[in-house]
Image (cartoon, grey):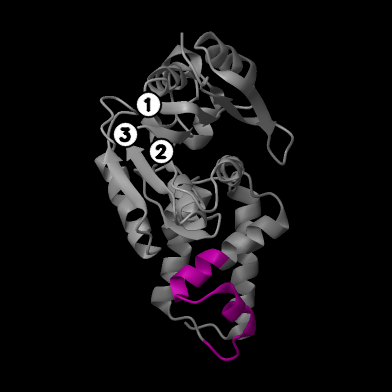
Amino acid sequence: MQFTQNQLNLVLQQAVAKLQQEAIGLSEQREAQIEAEILLSEVLNKNRTWLKTWSDYELNETELASFAKFLQRRVSGEPLAYIIGFQEFWSLSLKVTEHTLIPRPETELLVEMALDKIPLKADFKVADLGTGTGAIALSIAIERAQATVFAVDFSAEALRIAQQNRQANGLTNVTLVENSWLKNWQYGELDLIVSNPPYVAAEDPHLDDLAYEPYSALVADEDGFADIITIAEQAKNVLKPNGYLMFEHGYEQAEKVNAILSELGYQNIRTVKDLSQLDRVTLAQLPAFSF
């Protein structure tokens, strides 16, 4: 059986209804419509604009079966980005796999704050710790071609994806580093360190909604603060005087992160809210002189 345009529109409508009824977080018709169109576009290797303008195209049985499988994966809770294999972030389209976190819009705030500290025309060395897909590092690199950016991750699989994203975007000012944060750092002093580290506590109920994403990239000991503490401690030995450290963290963690940084001797500590007016990124500066 094949479907003409009108019948195909009916298939899309049925998919939207299914997503609204059964997919977690897709009760809104607009969101479900977008996801149904994205999944169908992926099946047909076309963009959403093409979907809206075709005339006599007919879906064959193979395409229908593929679309049905994609829908079932989404209804089962698998994130859209893992199904189609990529996620938009900043100005980039990034490959994602089960070995990487899915880059999220709120993380763009960390990129914005980093760019605010990086001069347009000067040498500058930046490290993105826990780079995953390379989202933060590559976004910085594409906006600041003169900067040297280190994309650091302990996961070889994650770095493999970051490498593919670096190549796909033609970026030559990014160095991939397989390492546990800044341990035994061998690349000289840094002007800026950014990180979206694991910050979820092991008992956090929100983990149920993140079951498809890598646990080690989400969860940290000490109620979610262990990696933030480690990075802040190590950064003191790597940052240049007056260098900056920036973290993304949970919206209820700002007070504790501020306290950690203050206890370690950082100065000019402040937290910035995201577009939802939630505490999202905290930055601090290493003093010019240490005593």
Instruction: Say which element carries label 1.
Output: loop
Residue 45 position within the rendered picture, expressed as x and y whole percent measured from the top left = 45, 75
Instruction: Say which element carries label 3.
Output: loop
> Which residue bears the numbered disc 2?
127
Residue that appears at 46% across and 48% down: 135
* Mark 2 Cα shell of 10 Å, populated few (<14), some (14-19), many (≥20): many
Q: Amino acid at mark 3?
A: Gly
Residue that appears at 53% across and 87% down: 57
Q: Amino acid at mark 1?
A: Val
* Mark 3 Cα shell of 10 Å, populated few (<14), some (14-19), many (≥20): few
Picture disc at residue 238: 1
Residue 256 position within the rendered picture, expressed as x and y whole percent measured from the top left = 59, 14
Compared across the picture, whether 237 is left or right of 106 comes to left
Is 194 drawn above or below residue 118 in the view shown?
above
Whether pointer 1 and pointer 2 mark residues with C-beta atoms closer than 8 Å, the reply is yes
> Which residue bears the numbered disc 3?
188
Tell me which label, 1 or 2, sits earlier in the chain: 2
Q: Judge whether residue 7 is colored magenta.
A: no
Question: Whole-Å distance between the Cαs marked 1 and 3?
Answer: 7 Å
